[in-house]
Structure formats: structure tokens, C-alpha cells
Amino acid sequence: MIEQTLVLIKPDGVARGLVGEITKRFEQRGLKIVGLKLTQINADFSKKHYASHVDKDFYKGLEKYILSGPIVAIAIEGLHAVETVRKIVGGTAPKDAFVGTIRGDFAHVSFEHADKEKKSVANLIHASGTLEEAKEEVALWFSIDELHSYKRTDDDHVL
Ligand code: CMP
């Protein structure tokens, strides 16, 4: 049941100086950071990461958004990590994300507004949707030697 999942702090999260605040939310829940890097991706890599969205109407805007600045990629490990991380992140559209989640606390834009402005929804974060997706995405973003295994001092209390 120990899973690994991928979190991306998208260019708006990095540009707004929210890297520490966002990372803290996962760490305080007891989830373990096992990979972490700041990186700027290109269009080819975006198409690989968002392969299931490439044919959608919003993809062009999504690619522009995701290439607009550096991204922090985090591999996170923990019990039920995929589901727990998604709960901490909140719903895809910040307008509908619950208060207390990252998107619900730091953004409020709607799909309607973004579509009208022909922009992608600036929703701060990407988090893998399923365990299968998480395995593929962690492998896409991190090489084996960039992933680390260690014991957190609070493992005995929070696991
Ligand atoms: P993310 O979790 O990174 O996964 C796919 C992204 O596509 C999503 O966050 C949003 O940024 C974007 N997205 C999904 N649906 C729409 C939509 N209807 N209009 C605009 N952007 C979208």
C-alpha cells in the first residue's frame, strides 16, 4: 500500500513563491519527499506528460501555460499516496476546490473564465490521478538515481 505519486508545482506556483507553502502541505501530513527538482520542460516533454490531453481543445493553452516558466517536480511516497495527495491538492478547477485544499486556498479561477480568456486554468499543481498514472509519471519525470529511500524520524508515529 506504500505508493509513489507525482506532484508538479506549475509555473504559476513557482512564480508566486508558493513552493515552500505547497511542499509543506504534503510533508505535514506525513508524506515523504523521495524526489525533488526545479526544471523547465519543452513542448515535446509536455506532449509526453499530457499525452491523454494532446487532442483536446484546451491543450494549446495548457502547453503555453506549462512551458511559461520553471516547474518543481516532486515524487511523493506514502500509504495511499495517490489518493491522499489528490485530496490535499483539491478539485481541478480552483473555483470548485474545497477551502483547505491547496487549490481552494490559493486560487479561485473557473474553467468558464479561463475558456473565455482563451487561457489555461492556472491551478498551481498537477497530481497523478491513478496509481497506474503515478507509476508512469514518476518514471517519466525521475530517473532511478534521482529517487531516494530513507526513514523519516516521524514514520513510527504517522504511518
Ligand atoms: P492537471 O491536473 O495538470 O491535468 C490536466 C490539466 O488540464 C488540468 O490540470 C488543467 O490545468 C487543464 N484542464 C483540464 N480541463 C480543462 C478545461 N476544460 N479547460 C482548460 N484547462 C483544462
Image (spheres, helix red, strand yellow):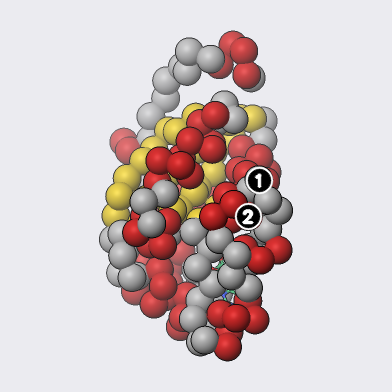
Q: CA distance from mark 1 to mark 2?
A: 6 Å
Q: Is residue 140 visible?
A: no
Q: Nearer the viewer, residue 19 or 33?
A: 19
Residue at (55% x, 16% y) in the render: 155
Residue at (54% x, 29% y) in the render: 28
* Residue 36 rendering spot, x and y as whole percentages: 36, 41
Q: Quadrant of ligand 1?
A: bottom right
Q: Please rate how many residues cluster around mark 2, counting C-alpha atoms within 10 Å: few if below 14, some from 14 to 19, many from 20.
A: many
Report the label total: 2
Residue 100, label in figure: 1
SS at mark 1 in the image: loop
Q: Amino acid at mark 1?
A: Gly
Quadrant showing the C terminus: top right
Q: Is residue 159 left or right of residue 153?
A: right
Q: Nearer the viewer, residue 18 or 23?
A: 18
SS at mark 2 in the image: helix
* Residue 40 rendering spot, x and y as whole percentages: 28, 61
Q: From the viewer's perspective, is residue 65 above or below residue 31?
A: below
Say whether marks 1 and 2 touch (CB < 8 Å).
yes
Q: From the viewer's perspective, is residue 42 above or below residue 152?
A: below
Residue annotated with mark 2? 104
Q: Is residue 11 left or right of residue 53?
A: left
* Residue 41 rendering spot, x and y as whole percentages: 31, 64
Q: Nearer the viewer, residue 142 or 59?
A: 59
